Image: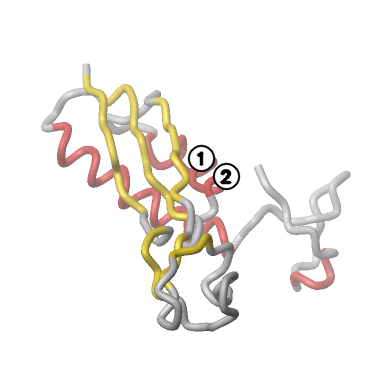
Amino acid sequence: MGFHKKPCSAISHPDPIPGVGYFPIAEETMHEMSITQSVVEICQGHAAGRKVTDVVLEIGELSGVVPDSIEFCFEACSKGTLLEGARLRMEMVPGIGSCPCCDRQAPMATLFDPCPDCGAFGLSIVSGEELRVKELELE
């Protein structure tokens, strides 16, 4: 489980967690909670009533999705469903951009990285924004 690294006063809630002094991730986890709920619904739809034992997600490094939060939310979202107890595996897809000036492809760590070859901005994203269920294993 992750925690904000900001002091409690910066989060505007009066009661810190005893012995920790920080609050559990709130806004970030809420985003991933709704994503994880959607993943569970998609998996249940494709499982056609069969128990799901393994789920493989592809998550792009530029997608804005926090894998640790997805993992944290998965257990809660899958409780009482066909996915309860299923193993979740996440495969990260690297960010890759295509330069409009020199036509080269290059790794991207953020959406606004310049081309490492010519320095131009405005790379077109080739990969890294993915968020998809890649595989389901059923009983």
Q: Nearer the viewer, residue 129 or 118?
A: 118
* Residue 32, image x, y percentages: 47, 55
Q: Quadrant of residue 138?
A: top left
Q: Does residue 61 appear to the left or right of 4 in the view shown?
A: left
Residue occupying the point 17% across, 24% down: 50
Residue occupying the point 31% across, 30% down: 83
Q: Nearer the viewer, residue 3 or 93?
A: 93
Q: Quadrant of residue 25?
A: bottom right
> For mark 1, does the 10 Å Cα neighbourhood hold few (<14), some (14 to 19), or many (20 or more) residues?
some
**Which residue carries the number 2 mark?**
68
Q: Quadrant of residue 46?
A: top left
Q: Does residue 64 appear to the left or right of 41 in the view shown?
A: right
Q: Is residue 137 above or below residue 105?
A: above
The CA span between labels 1 and 2 is 5 Å
| Figure coloring | secondary structure
Q: Does residue 48 appear to the left or right of 31 in the view shown?
A: left
Q: Is residue 90 above or below residue 126?
A: above
The residue lying furthest to the left in this view is 48
**Which residue carries the number 1 mark?**
71
Q: Does residue 24 appear to the left or right of 96 in the view shown?
A: right
Q: How many marks?
A: 2
The N terminus, quarter of image: top right
* Residue 65, image x, y percentages: 49, 57
Residue occupying the point 31% across, 43% down: 40
Residue occupying the point 80% across, 67% down: 14
Q: Is residue 74 above or below residue 120?
A: above
- SS under mark 1: helix
Q: Is residue 16 above or below residue 44?
A: below
Amino acid type of the residue tagged 1 in the rendering: Glu
The answer to whether the residue labelled 1 contacts the one labelled 2, judged by CB atoms less than 8 Å apart, is yes
* Residue 31, image x, y percentages: 48, 61
